[in-house]
Image (spheres, helix red, strand yellow):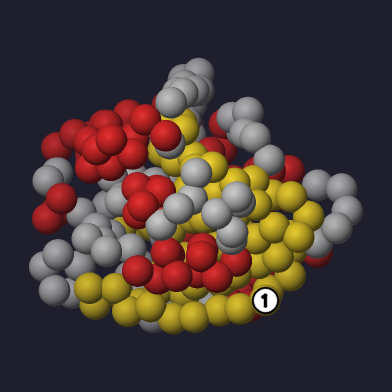
Amino acid sequence: MSRIADEPTDPLGARRAHWEAVYRDRPDDRLSWRQADPALSLRLIRAFATPDSAVLDVGAGESALSARLFEAGHRRLAALDVSESAIARAQARAGAAAQSIRWIVADVLAAPSLEPVDIWHDRAVFHFLTEASDRRRYVDLAAAAVRPGGHAILLTFAPDGPERCSDLPVRRYDAPALALEFGDRFELVRSEREDHTTPWEKVQPFTAAILRRKPGPP
């Protein structure tokens, strides 16, 4: 198990402070994105990955996704989140499997040093990037990290989804709009819709887009 910590900067420091407070102060049943069973993410990753694929979960939060992938036979797993409290909760939930997962405490926009991956998974980070410059930085990092032929699996709020989450504004996407953000270095190969039910029984529509990394420079 390893841990990378990014250096505090602004506005990255403010973003980290926000999410650290969220995960420090709110129990699981007050996190709207909470999933006891990350079924769609598991299914999509396993559709495009083998047990030998390197999988990175961006914005992992307290999710059980990495632990569930480990249970399914995947061994090259990394989970990244800006909140150390979130990572601690995910590690505790993973139990013994936590020792076999690489945990990274960092803001993805700080462009931490990442190993090449076959699967880049992001559920509910990209839609918080309301500034075009932040989205370009994110896409550049994804293009550099995902091997040609690998996949980025993005889940964001759908066009009819919430306009805000965790007291922050978001951008909403359908699959073609997500593909447009990722430009000519990725191509859309599949999309789905998910109607996520929050712990307090409110439905939030999500768009899931699977983008294949094209050959060529990042």
Q: Is residue 7 left or right of residue 196?
A: right
Q: How many residues crowd around disc 1 within 10 Å: few (fewer than 14), some, or many (20 or more)?
A: few
Q: Quadrant of the N terminus?
A: top left
Most distant residue in the right direction: 216
Residue depicted at x 69% and y 49%: 146
Residue 58 position, x and y percent, is 48, 47
Residue 205 position, x and y percent, is 35, 77
Residue 152 position, x and y percent, is 61, 59
Q: Which residue is mark 1?
A: 189
| Helix, strand or loop status at disc 1 | strand
Residue depicted at x 41% and y 57%: 72
Residue depicted at x 43% and y 36%: 101
Q: Which quadrant of the view contains residue 26?
A: top left
Q: Which quadrant of the view contains residue 34?
A: bottom left
Residue 76 vs residue 167, the one in the foreground: 76
Most distant residue in the front direction: 73
Most distant residue in the top direction: 7
